[in-house]
Amino acid sequence: MNFSLKLTSPSLTCSSTKLPVHRPQLSTFPTVHNVDHNRGHNSLLKPLYLSTTENLVAQPRRRNVTECRAYEADRSRPLEINIDLPAQEAAQKLKIGLYFATWWALNVVFNIYNKKVLNAFPYPWLTSTLSLAAGSLMMLISWATRVAEAPKVNLDFWKALFPVAVAHTIGHVAATVSMSKVAVSFTHIIKSGEPAFSVLVSRFLLGEAFPTSVYLSLLPIIGGCALAAVTELNFNMIGFMGAMISNLAFVFRNIFSKKGMKGMSVSGMNYYACLSIMSLLILTPFAIAVEGPKLWAAGWQTAVSQIGPNFVWWVVAQSVFYHLYNQVSYMSLDQISPLTFSIGNTMKRISVIVSSIIIFHTPVQPINALGAAIAILGTFIYSQAKQ
């Protein structure tokens, strides 16, 4: 007995014929069959089964999808970015080379004019003050005219800078006092022993340990400086002690700078400008107390009468070049590693020593030159061992 099932929906009938499709319907329903249609009327109580469910699933419309793949996920594709690394490295090396050449040249010029001024005007406290004053004035004008961007600093910055400025002031004055008493070459030979002071202060005051190679590198530095001092023809104790005090002061300047200036985002140029301004404020009252305007006036008249108007140019040159060479050195430190800077500083001393001996006709004994060479070589070895 055959039965047909009609549903009450006006738009849907289950039969052997295909059902009409009414939008927005996506597909038709399957035909419904009674599995036991030959078993009598009790077969109506049997469950109904669907022959297929394929058409019940709505098929979504296909859309154009843009596929994005990361380069690391598919290395078969080349990285389409043009990077010219050799050209950048060459430009960086050229930049560093220009920094070094400028740094050394400015330092040589400063030392020559500084020695000329001190020979005619033996007042190192005023000479040191004028050097800081010239640099401070130059930077204040640069900030006011927007030639250089003024640093954004606060009170905490100046507090952290104060001990650095004190050490810088002592080191600057001590070095100038030394050069007023002895030859420029001798001062720089003694100042090449600064690494020895750095290691000793860090070891005994800060408890910092170093590799054995660092301690061994101090032997030629100390030995070379001692040999040069003993064989110096124009030895002067004030000049010798001035160079030694300068070494110690600059070591503490570096220590205070590392400890107190962490996290201070100031460029090398502006950092040294702020350091010069604070050092000038510290030094001025001491210079007045030690030497005083009366001595300065008398010494100035004597120097002008002996040298002529050129003496004024010497004073201006030594003041300006002092600031410029220090500013370039701090700018160089922004671009290079401390190791490269140490090597550059060693080579700078060689250029100053050689040029000053040639220009001022400084008499040098072979044993004295050997001591200087040993000390400078030890400084170079130290810079390598420190890394």
Image (cartoon, helix red, strand yellow):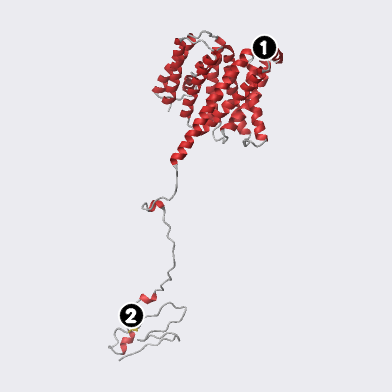
Kindly identify the residue that appears in the image at 60 percent across and 28 percent down: 275
- The image quadrant that residue 245 belongs to is top right
Secondary structure under badge 2?
strand
In the rendered image, the residue lying farthest to the left is: 38
Report how many numbered discs are placed on residues in the image.
2
Crowd rating for badge 1 (residues with CA inside 10 Å; few <14, some 14–19, many 20+): few
Kindly identify the residue that appears in the image at 55 percent across and 14 percent down: 360
- The quadrant of the picture occupied by the N terminus is bottom left
Crowd rating for badge 2 (residues with CA inside 10 Å; few <14, some 14–19, many 20+): few
280 relative to 349 in the view: left or right: right
Label of residue 192 in the image: none
Secondary structure under badge 1?
helix
49 relative to 315 in the view: left or right: left
Can residue 171 be seen by looking at this rendering?
no
Please state the horizontal and vertical placement of residue 287, each as a whole percent of the image: 66, 18
**In the picture shown, does residue 294 fall above or below 75?**
above
**In the picture shown, does residue 82 fall above or below 37?**
above
Instruction: Specify which label sits upstream in the sequence, 1 or 2.
Output: 2
Q: Which residue type carries mark 2?
A: Tyr
Q: CA distance from mark 1 to mark 2?
A: 125 Å
Viewer-proximal residue, 24 or 156?
24
Label of residue 49 in the image: 2
- The image quadrant that residue 8 belongs to is bottom left
Kindly identify the residue that appears in the image at 62 percent across and 26 percent down: 276
Can you tell which of label 1 and label 2 is closer to the viewer? 1
Please state the horizontal and vertical placement of residue 7, each as a whole percent of the image: 41, 86
Viewer-proximal residue, 158 or 277?
277
Can residue 300 be seen by looking at this rendering?
yes
Please state the horizontal and vertical placement of residue 4, each as a whole percent of the image: 35, 89
Determine which residue is flagged by label 1: 306
